[in-house]
Amino acid sequence: MKKFLLTITLMGCGYFANAQQYALFGTRTMFDAFENVSQKSFTLDSSRKFSSNFFLPNFGANSANIGEAAYSIRKLTQEGVNDTRNLPLGTGAINHFYLNSNVYVATFRLFKSYKYQKEIGLAWQVRTDSHIDYTNETLAIFDNYDRFPTATPLNGIFNTKGYQQSYHQFSFTYRENYNKRLAFGLKASVLSGILYNKLDITSSSLRVNPALNSLDITFNGNYASNFSDTDEINKNTFFPNFKNPGLSLSFGTNYTTKKGLFLMANVKDLGFIWWRSGTINNSINNRTTTLNELNDESSNNNQEIRDIFLGGPSGKFLAATNAKFDVYVSRRYGFYKPALVVSKNLFYKGGDIAFVNTIIYNNFSASVTPVYNLNNILMIGLQGKYQTPNFELFAGTDNLFSTFNQARGIYNKTADVGTGPNGASVYMGVGIKFGNVVNHPQFSDVIPGINDQQEGSFFKNLFSIFKRK
């Protein structure tokens, strides 16, 4: 029972603190250009024509837990022990746990045309977005049911809401300069769903009967998933097969003022996935089960709990991707570059306000980024970057102190490290450019797009259509 419940509870986890490597915004790295689609990544007279990560690491992952269960989660993750003896019960407190990741498996980008500074890119990403809101009692029942009052119905103690969605994203990006100050870009993606798991328990109750060594549990709510058995998840699950297809679109613009103020806005990953292969969409209406012989590992309790959630009919459903709207403003003052980022989720909870402080020395830079999450989370990010016109290497964290404490606690196998919300965040990336140098016309015999007269500007042609209408 515990194994299955813990699986469906923690597979759908995440409370969107939304940190997304803000220190890389405005850097013209390959990551910046793929995430902020109007951004350029090639430098005339210096960069070579093509760029790729050559399957080298380019990823970011964030997780955190907030609430009264912070110490119990720290105990679980750092010592491997589920100990909820000090977790208060009956308070109605809600905890929030989040996990999200973005991995660029492969990238390729080319400088297409000198005129309009056109760039085209292809990318393969694997993304995960997830969150869960859960009660103290949901965690405590995995530890010891003896902590709960006996012979008294306990209502609402397992009310849990959360989801997890993982998918492959295959993208085509295009950007160009509209004029010397204004640029536009877009990113069109085909998606292949990997895993989906959503749990929404709207009402619940528990009655402990110690005389019979049994529990009566009742649930109301909904459970949706694309697998009916955790044993079905294997390495083949994670290969793209498009059994659960989807689409998404990103578009953005940037503008540089005469005084050097850089403004950028993006709508990111606006799309959906059609989950239709092996799916379950189960309405749970006053489903009650009695769990007997609680201390007997050979009992059928696990199967009885599974039947509550998995016993419903199959059903295809659409799920929105975690679309965001970002606004970025920056200006460089010599070696110092401050920037402000405001990011808001469009369909799910979460949003950030980040203040990026970057110190630049030759090809090296270091950034310190305080981030305030709209769900009352404060984080401090730290990043180091080495970047030339043809090579880039960066690494950082969006949550410095929690990551340090989590790593130290795991290393020392103790939960007595760190206080407050616990979590971890890490990201890094590599990009390499190769091929001919993209020069100005007067300096090169090979000039991509210098005679680009027939194709012209994609966005000027697009806007002229709307003007004619």
Image (tube, rainbow, N blue to C red):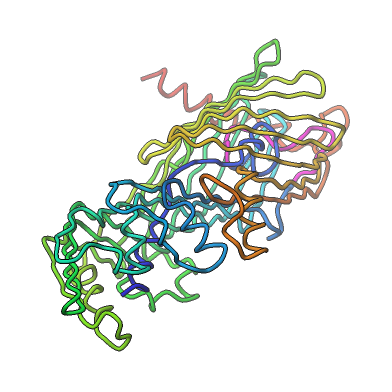
Q: Is residue 134 visible?
A: yes
Q: Is residue 324 above or below residue 128?
A: above
Furthest residue to the left?
286
The quadrant of the picture occupied by the C terminus is top left
Estimate the x, y position of residue 452 in percent, counting from the top left.
67, 32
**Residue 39, horizontal then vertical, whole percent:** 63, 33
Q: Which residues are magenta?
A: 35-49
115 relative position to 217: left or right: right
Quarter occupied by the N terminus: bottom left
Q: Residue furthest bottom?
A: 298
Is residue 367 shown left or right of residue 187?
Answer: right
- On whether residue 44 falls in the magenta region, the answer is yes
In the image, 317 versus 330, the foreground residue is 330
Q: Is residue 43 above or below residue 278?
A: above
Percent coordinates x, y for residue 60 in the rendering: 60, 51
Q: Quadrant of residue 374?
A: top left
Please give left or right for residue 395 compared with residue 334 in the image. Answer: left
What secondary structure do most residues of the magenta stretch adopt?
A: loop
Asked if one can make out residue 122 in the rendered structure from this viewpoint, the answer is no
**From what the image shows, is residue 144 above or below residue 345?**
below
Q: Which residue is found at the position 39% from the left and 55% from the top?
A: 87
Residue at image position (74%, 46%) is: 394
Considering only vertical position in the picture, is 268 above or below 50?
above
For the point 49% across and 34% down, which residue is it?
373
Out of 378 and 313, give the one closest to the viewer. Answer: 378
Q: How many marks?
A: 0
**In magenta segment, residue 231:** no
